[in-house]
């Protein structure tokens, strides 16, 4: 009887939280799914049900395809760049924990993550500037050809990958450091007694034992990579004239369809595609890392 | 006795609450008696003008409070879309919108009709040319008050022209290219350091397509032309489109007078980083502020220009909205329009006003008001998907501007134009606007 009362009390206690979660998290997702099946023009009174017509149109829309390809390249590019770098940097910082500079290292790596995105992107825009940027000045110093970083179709995507990785790195390093701090010291001591070097311990002990952390960090990095928008927007924006090549990404395409073309239903179908992609990739990551973890 | 004391205590509390309620009500009434309105603008440089208009209304409305919210055009368009559909704005809002953008709101009854006195003011031919009153109307009913227009002309740096041995502005599109070649300054390696002719080649949004349309207009082409019965058709997969695109490509890849990464537009012109470019009249005011010593002149375009009228619309409760409409009319007062031209540079649409006090002092305005006979204007079609069409054409053009192989291959240019035209037709067909 007491157990039942406690159970009811627990349910009642978490009910408000659940209700808020359902309203702010689940309802928008469900509503996006619903909107994707309608010709839902933000201004029009008539919003007919069109079934999967929005999705069919998406498949032939070259702007959407281009946005999807760019976003996928950026998301995986950021993942590939961030995870190994974060792991190595976290290991270096962890092994320098007793150093007086440990706090400085951690802060220095984490700062880009907390810096406001727009000014940071503006700073990178200057770094990538074809004429005045320090990056091209450096290339020129070493006798290498200067590049049109923000205008070349390939380089402009690489610029966004670099900017996103720079921002994501701090968070990933911080999480990895926490992971390192929780690894059992005895194992490393045993490995050392067996004659394992530092890099060998890192490769054969740290990396396998940090798999849950890697799973978490890679999911977060990949999901935020697929949601890239502001970086692409700022790097290509300017008050006038010659801003930069607009790298079309999915969120940008959605915003354009929603609030410039007023086709909210169509934009919702893009959001559904993005949701499915992110869900599938997350499931794949979970299954890959879990299976290997078991083995 | 106990009950009585409770009653007394309750009454005291009730009295205090009533007093607080009455106090807040009085405060609310006091604030309500102050007339307030908000102005939404898509041009930050227009903020001082609206503040000037508000200041002028103070005599008749001492308690009038005008809040001017002027932000970048694309963000303004998003704000209007969300505000008008979601009821995001409180009180009276004066909204600045181009006629072509306003159409989709008018189609869906989201912008109210103007009151009779305002309608009569707008329809009066002494005040506005029919072109302007038509763009402020929908199905013959006035919904907005015309204010200013975007109209293009050539800006050219007279010092650079003199140094290149050019006596005057180019008169034909062919001359634009030959002049650009002569005006381009290069470093020792031959790389352009000052563009001969700044063209819009990059960035997001529809600006690239609009600028392309202006150039193509000189060759007789258009992205869209009316085909009767409210239907439209494309008019650029043809010789005019080929000539316009070929000129862009020739300047980028053949003569290399301009590149996408070069500084461009008004900023570049003001800094001496380009010798000439096509832009609206607001640049005159911008130059006066940022580069007052710049030696430049303006000239009409070879055949004609875009004329993009912007109107003021008022949203709010019918009674409260009166102050909004009064503001829209006050903005069109002669002294305010002269102030607008002098201090901001956008061209007022109202007729019968003596602007000579400004134009005589600033000859650069001549190209915008003293254009040759037969000068042909075009405007953006007032159809719902116009922005989507222009944005998609712009996205295609950016790809073309990066394709050097197209510069000397007419067949490739034609295929590109056909593909882009088909894409526009698909949008028109989807919206039931495509001419058969």
Image (tube, coloured by chain):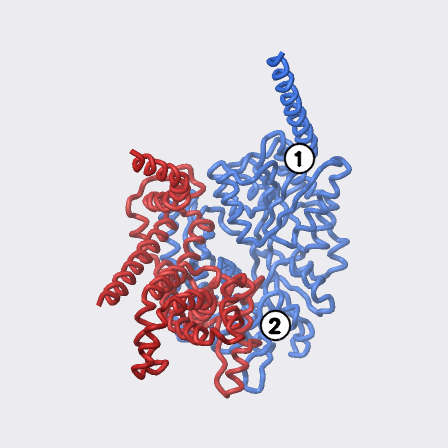
Q: Nearer the viewer, residue A14 or B368?
A: A14
Where is residue B232? Give x, y as percent.
Answer: 42, 49
Residue found 46% across the figure and 61% down from its top? B394
Label disc, if present, on residue B323 of the rendered structure: 1
The letter of the red chain is A
As drawn, B394 above or below B380:
below
Determine the chain carrying the residue at label 1.
B
Q: SS at mark 1?
A: helix
Residue found 28% across the figure and 47% down from its top? A52
Specify few, some or many for label 2: CA neighbours under 10 Å numbering under 14, 14-19, or 20 or more: many
Q: Is residue A162 visible?
A: yes
Where is residue B355? Give x, y as percent.
Answer: 73, 51
Q: Where, by quadrant of the figure, is residue A202 drawn? A: bottom left
Q: Nearer the viewer, residue B306 or A97?
A: A97
Real-space Cα distance between discs 2 and 1?
45 Å
The letter of the blue chain is B
Q: Considering the image in quadrants, where does the C terminus of chain A appear?
A: bottom left
Q: Where, by quadrant of the figure, is residue A199 drawn? A: bottom left
Specify few, some or many for label 1: CA neighbours under 10 Å numbering under 14, 14-19, or 20 or more: many
- Residue that badge 2 annotates: B274
What residue occupies the far top of the structure in this picture? B1
Q: SS at mark 2?
A: loop
Where is residue A24? Give x, y as percent.
Answer: 42, 44
Q: Is residue B400 visible?
A: no
Please check whether the numbered discs 2 and 1 fall on a single chain: yes
Task: Name the side, left or right, on which A89 lies relative to B267.
Answer: left
């Amino acid at each position: 009887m007491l157990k039942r009362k406690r159970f009811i009390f627990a349910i009642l206690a978490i009910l408000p939280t659940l209700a808020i979660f359902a309203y702010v998290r689940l309802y928008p997702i469900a509503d996006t799914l619903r909107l994707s099946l309608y010709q839902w023009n933000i201004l029009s009174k008539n919003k007919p049900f069109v079934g999967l017509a929005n999705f069919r149109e998406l498949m032939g829309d070259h702007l959407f395809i281009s946005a999807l390809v760019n976003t996928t390249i950026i998301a995986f590019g950021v993942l590939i760049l961030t995870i190994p770098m974060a792991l190595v940097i976290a290991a270096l910082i962890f092994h320098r924990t007793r150093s007086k500079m440990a706090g400085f290292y951690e802060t220095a790596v984490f700062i880009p993550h907390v810096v406001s995105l727009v000014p940071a992107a503006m700073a990178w825009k200057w770094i990538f500037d074809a004429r005045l940027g320090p990056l091209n000045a450096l290339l020129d110093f070493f006798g290498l050809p200067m590049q049109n970083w923000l205008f070349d179709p390939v380089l402009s995507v690489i610029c966004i990958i670099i900017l996103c990785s720079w921002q994501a790195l701090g968070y990933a390093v911080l999480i990895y450091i926490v992971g390192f701090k929780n690894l059992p010291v005895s194992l490393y001591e045993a490995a050392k007694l067996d004659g394992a070097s530092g890099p060998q311990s890192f490769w054969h002990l740290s990396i396998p034992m940090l798999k849950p952390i890697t799973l978490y960090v890679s999911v977060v990095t990949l999901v935020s990579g697929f949601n890239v928008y502001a970086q692409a927007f700022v790097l290509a924006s300017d008050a006038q004239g010659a801003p930069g090549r607009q790298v079309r990404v999915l969120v940008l395409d959605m915003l354009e369809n929603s609030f410039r073309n007023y086709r909210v239903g169509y934009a919702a179908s893009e959001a559904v595609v993005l949701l499915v992609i992110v869900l599938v990739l997350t499931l794949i990551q979970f299954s890959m890392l879990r299976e290997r973890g078991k083995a | 006795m106990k009950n009585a004391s409770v009653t007394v205590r309750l009454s005291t509390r009730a009295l205090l609450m009533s007093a607080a309620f009455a106090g807040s009500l009085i405060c609310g009434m006091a604030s309500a008696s102050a007339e307030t309105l908000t102005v939404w603008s898509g041009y930050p440089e227009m903020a001082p003008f609206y503040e000037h208009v508000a200041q002028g209304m103070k005599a008749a409305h001492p308690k009038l409070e005008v809040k001017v919210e002027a932000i970048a055009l694309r963000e303004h368009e998003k704000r209007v879309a969300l505000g008008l559909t979601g009821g995001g704005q409180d009180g009276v809002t004066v909204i600045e919108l181009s006629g072509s953008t306003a159409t989709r709101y008018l189609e869906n009854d989201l912008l109210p009709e103007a009151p009779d006195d305002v309608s009569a003011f707008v329809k009066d031919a002494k005040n506005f040319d029919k072109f302007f009153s038509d763009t402020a109307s929908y199905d013959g009913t006035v919904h907005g008050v015309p204010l200013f227009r975007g109209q293009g002309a050539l800006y050219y740096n007279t010092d650079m022209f003199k140094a290149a041995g050019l006596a005057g502005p180019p008169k034909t599109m062919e001359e634009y290219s030959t002049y650009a070649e002569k005006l381009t300054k290069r470093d020792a390696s031959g790389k352009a350091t000052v563009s001969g002719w700044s063209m819009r080649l990059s960035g997001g949004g529809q600006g690239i397509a609009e600028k392309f349309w202006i150039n193509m207009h000189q060759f007789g082409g258009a992205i869209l032309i009316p085909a009767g019965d409210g239907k439209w058709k494309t008019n650029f997969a043809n010789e005019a489109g080929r000539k316009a695109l070929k000129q862009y490509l020739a300047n980028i890849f053949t003569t290399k007078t301009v590149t996408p990464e070069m500084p461009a537009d008004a900023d570049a012109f003001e800094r001496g980083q380009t010798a000439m470019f096509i832009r609206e009249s607001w640049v005159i005011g911008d130059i006066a502020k940022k580069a007052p010593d710049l030696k430049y002149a303006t000239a009409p375009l070879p055949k004609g220009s875009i004329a993009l009228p912007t109107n003021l619309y008022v949203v709010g409760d019918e009674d409260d909205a009166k102050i909004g409409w009064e503001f829209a009319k006050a903005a069109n007062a002669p002294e305010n329009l002269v102030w607008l031209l002098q201090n901001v540079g956008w061209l007022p649409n109202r007729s019968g006003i003596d602007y000579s006090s400004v134009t005589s002092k600033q000859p650069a305005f001549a190209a915008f008001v003293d254009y040759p006979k037969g000068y042909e204007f075009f405007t953006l079609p007032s159809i719902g998907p116009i922005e989507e069409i222009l944005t998609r054409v712009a996205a295609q053009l950016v790809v073309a501007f990066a394709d050097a192989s197209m510069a000397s291959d007419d067949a490739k240019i034609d295929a590109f134009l056909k593909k882009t035209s088909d894409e526009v037709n698909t949008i028109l067909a989807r919206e039931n606007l495509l001419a058969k």
